Image (spheres, rainbow, N blue to C red):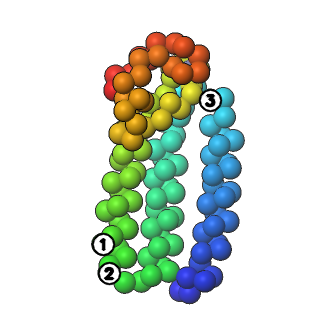
């Protein structure tokens, strides 16, 4: 398919998905976020890979985007830390040394229970 048509469609999807996810996770407990963030991230990954493979239907697209997307999905899934007290997403421990080393929540000051 023509990337000139697919890109605006994906852009609208991405904006709606980002706003919807932000509203859905707003003021939700950490357990809710731990449970549903990987599900939504996986759904977004599938949609992104579908658009990428439709826009650029070559084997190179598949060989580059699928492993990179799956790797980023697992980094986000296994690396995100949340405060059990206030539900704040503290960040990704694989991307930030401060998040990995944090023992207290930066928002409410509660001691973090999950081990980095
Ligand atoms: Zn907190």
Q: Earlier in the sequence, mark 3 or mark 2?
A: 3
User: Above or below — where is 7 with respect to 114?
Assistant: below
Residue 67, quarter of the rendered image: bottom left
Say whether marks 2 and 1 touch (CB < 8 Å): yes
At horizontal 51% and vertical 42% (from top left) the residue drawn is 37
Say whether marks 3 and 2 touch (CB < 8 Å): no
Label 2 crowd bin: few (<14), some (14–19), many (20+), radius 10 Å: few
Give the left or right position of residue 11, taking residue 31 as reference. Answer: right
Distance CA(mark 3)–CA(mark 2): 41 Å
Q: Quadrant of the C terminus?
A: top left
Q: Nearer the viewer, mark 3 or mark 1?
A: 1
**Residue 82 in the image: x percent, y percent?**
49, 28
Label of residue 72 in the image = none
Look at the numbered disc 1 and give the secondary structure of its residue.
Answer: helix
State the residue in front, 101 or 45.
Answer: 101
User: Above or below — where is 23 with respect to 29?
Assistant: below
Distance CA(mark 2)–CA(mark 1): 6 Å
User: Above or below — where is 114 with respect to 21?
Assistant: above
Dot 3 beta carbon under 8 Å from ligand 1: no
Dot 2 beta carbon under 8 Å from ligand 1: no
Residue 49 visible in image: yes
Q: Which residue in the protein does label 1 denote?
A: 63
Q: Which residue in the protein does label 3 denote?
A: 28
Q: Earlier in the sequence, mark 3 or mark 1?
A: 3
């Amino acid at each position: 398919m023509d990337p000139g048509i697919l890109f605006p469609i994906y852009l609208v999807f991405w904006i709606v998905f980002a706003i919807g996810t932000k509203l859905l996770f707003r003021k939700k407990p950490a357990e809710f976020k731990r449970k549903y963030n990987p599900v939504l991230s996986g759904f977004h990954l599938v949609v992104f890979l579908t658009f990428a493979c439709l826009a650029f239907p070559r084997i190179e697209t598949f060989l580059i985007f699928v492993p990179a997307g799956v790797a980023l999905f697992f980094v986000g899934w296994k690396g995100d830390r949340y405060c059990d007290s206030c539900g704040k997403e503290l960040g990704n421990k694989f991307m930030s040394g401060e998040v990995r080393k944090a023992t207290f929540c930066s928002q409410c000051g509660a001691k973090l229970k999950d081990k980095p």
